[in-house]
Image (tube, helix red, strand yellow):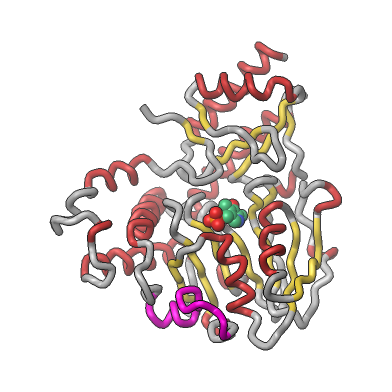
Amino acid sequence: MRIFNFSAGPAVLPEPVLQRAAQEMQDWHGSGMSVMEMSHRGSEFTSILEKTETDFRTLLGIPANYRVLFLQGGALAMNALIPMNLLGTKTSADYINTGEWSKKSIAEAQKYCQVHVAASSEDRHFTYVPPQSDWQLDSDAAYVHVCTNETIGGVEYQWVPDTGEVPLVADMSSHILSRVMDVSKYGVIYGGAQKNIGPAGLTFCIVRDDLLGRALPITPSVFNWKEQAEHDSMINTPPTYGIYIAGLVFEWLIAQGGLAVMEEKNKAKAALLYDYFDSTGFYRNPVDRADRSRMNVPFFLHDTALDAAFLHSAQQHGMLQLKGHRSVGGMRASIYNAMPIEGVRALVEFLKEFERSHG
Ligand SMILES: *Cc1c(COP(=O)(O)O)cnc(C)c1O
């Protein structure tokens, strides 16, 4: 029996994708092989990789002067690879600090370059996005790094920063494909696949081609974006099964009607939760309304002594992985593309019922 899975990541996948993967597990399209058993350079897998990239490009409207790389190492590896690949002759980079994932990016980048924190929302416990009018950008920075959806704090940019000539680099791990996006406003978009795309082990990197060729000489070849771009992400064996599942998810998204349709669905799902939290004193979401995430909705019970009972009862109602991140406590409902609105409705009904019996 399937439950409603509110995990922040690895996270819920669309049921039709899991069913299709199961059907094709032992014999992909009459090849007599599982995708896991194929040569990454054979014609079968090459066709999977090409289709996956094409559909990703179609969904996001990725312009022709951007390269799509499918890498390994996760978003955390990218935190090191961004300065390694983008510094060139520069020595510093600007970072906007909006929460736990920004902090991790900053800490890693500090090993490779001078990090200038151009704006931070730490003064109010990372409950908002600092407006661009408060950013102290350095025009000589190699790039400006943002995390456009803070998975732990539940803070999401609802606007695209303007960094002029300095490339904008965005960690979009937890909201890629959740809404219509203008890729042309960014120099680099990256993230781990395990939130809103597919299984862990696959990392996506969308990079504007004029930014290739700036890597520090010490950059490992498998992490050198220019080398990977020249070899279609195949310097070595790419995460083949992860790419295949991502491809099935992209097909599913296209069949749903694409990102404009997903955006409307995600808005409606998030509104169900936020409207309820704003109508009661029993639960509370701490994020400024304008900056609330549509993907990750943290919330707190007014009486934290009820947390354990809440989680236990939620589990009994078939709703799992609602515990908040250990760094902030409380609860968190992650409602990625693959979470149906029925799951969010069921959660709201449960929230109401728990409030009635414990309020
Ligand atoms: C999950 C997450 C990460 C870490 O990703 P890994 O693939 O585990 O390295 C980084 N940034 C954001 C915004 C995330 O949600």
Query: Which quarter of the figure has residue 314?
Result: top right
Q: Is residue 76 left or right of residue 330?
A: left
Q: Residue furthest top?
A: 357
Can you say whether 253 is above or below 227 in the image?
above
Question: Looking at the image, can residue 174 be seen?
Answer: no
Can you say whether 57 is above or below 281 in the image?
below
**Where ligand 1 lies, by quadrant?**
bottom right
* Location of residue 134 in the rendering, given as x and y in whole percent from the top left corner: 85, 63
Query: Which quarter of the figure has residue 159?
Result: bottom right
Q: Is residue 51 left or right of residue 318?
A: left
Q: Is residue 42 left or right of residue 125?
A: left
Q: Residue furthest bottom?
A: 89
Instruction: Give the residue displayed 67% in from the left and 62% down from the top.
Output: 105
Can you say whether 244 is above or below 232 in the image?
above
Can you say whether 24 is above or below 341 in the image?
below
Tell me the quarter of the image containing the C terminus: top right
How many numbered marks are there? 0
* Location of residue 47 in the rendering, given as x and y in whole percent from the top left corner: 26, 67
Instruction: Give the residue displayed 38% in from the left and 80% down from the top.
Output: 231
**Residue 226 is inside the magenta segment:** yes
Instruction: Give the residue displayed 15% in from the left and 59% down from the top.
Output: 31
In the image, 158 versus 27, the foreground residue is 27
* Location of residue 215 in the rendering, given as x and y in whole percent from the top left corner: 57, 82
Question: Looking at the image, can residue 26 be seen?
Answer: yes
In the image, 72 versus 27, the foreground residue is 72
In the image, 284 versus 123, the foreground residue is 123
Tell me the quarter of the image containing the N terminus: top left
**Residue 175 is inside the magenta segment:** no
Highlighted range, magenta: 217-232
